[in-house]
Amino acid sequence: MKKLWKNERGDMPFLTLFLMLAVVMVMSFVLLFATVKINCINIRNAFKMELNNVSASIYADTFHSQREANLMSYMADVHISPEYLAALEEGFIDGVKEKVPLVTDDYTLSEIEIQFFKHSDKIEYIATGLVTFNINMFGRWFPPIEQEIRLTGTHNTKY
């Protein structure tokens, strides 16, 4: 027993090998989990920043209408004009593409869209996207995990 503790023979006990292997496997899983979480946070932050930009665009476009207390005409234009909605959606998607890559070895971001809803005193927008995570652990590819991203925002107006 004393020789095992002092390791005088130069060999390593099997228990030590298994413990080292278990520690390496646990650390690999923790690092993989942390990578997925960091990617999720980065993608979510990109969506949040672009929703703020959409809100700023809507505010800049409604400033004149707010001064004239004519929000209803602006909100009607938002739903009548598909070009305006397409421009807001295109700006949102382009902004997300600038902030995070859409395809990496770790994930694929797809189906990015933004929808607008008109309420009596506000405009609500919902941004969605689909993230597919590719999991490679211990030299083996696991089935991809899909996660939907859904963030909402509103543009309130008060006179």
Image (cartoon, rainbow, N blue to C red):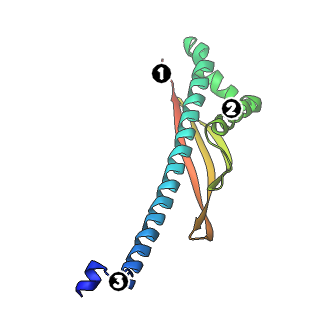
Q: Which is more foreground, mark 2 or mark 3? A: 3
Residue 91's disc number: 2
State which quadrant residue 74 falls in: top right
Q: Is residue 116 above or below residue 109?
A: above
**Residue holding disc 3:** 9
Residue 6 visible to an observer of this rendering: yes
- Dot 2 amino acid type: Gly
Which picture quadrant has residue 14? bottom left
Task: From the viewer's side, name the closer residue of 86 and 72.
Answer: 86
- Identify which residue is drawn at 61% across, 70% down: 139
| Structural distance between the alpha carbons of marks 2 and 3 | 68 Å
Q: Is residue 123 visible?
A: no
Q: Nearer the viewer, residue 69 or 6?
A: 6
Residue 2, image x, y percentages: 22, 85
Q: Residues within 10 Å of mark 2 (few under 14, many from 20)?
A: some
Q: Amino acid at mark 3?
A: Arg
Looking at the rendered structure, the kind of residue marked 1 is Lys
Residue that carries the numbered disc 1 in the rendered image:
158
How far from the left and from the top, in percent, is residue 87? 72, 30
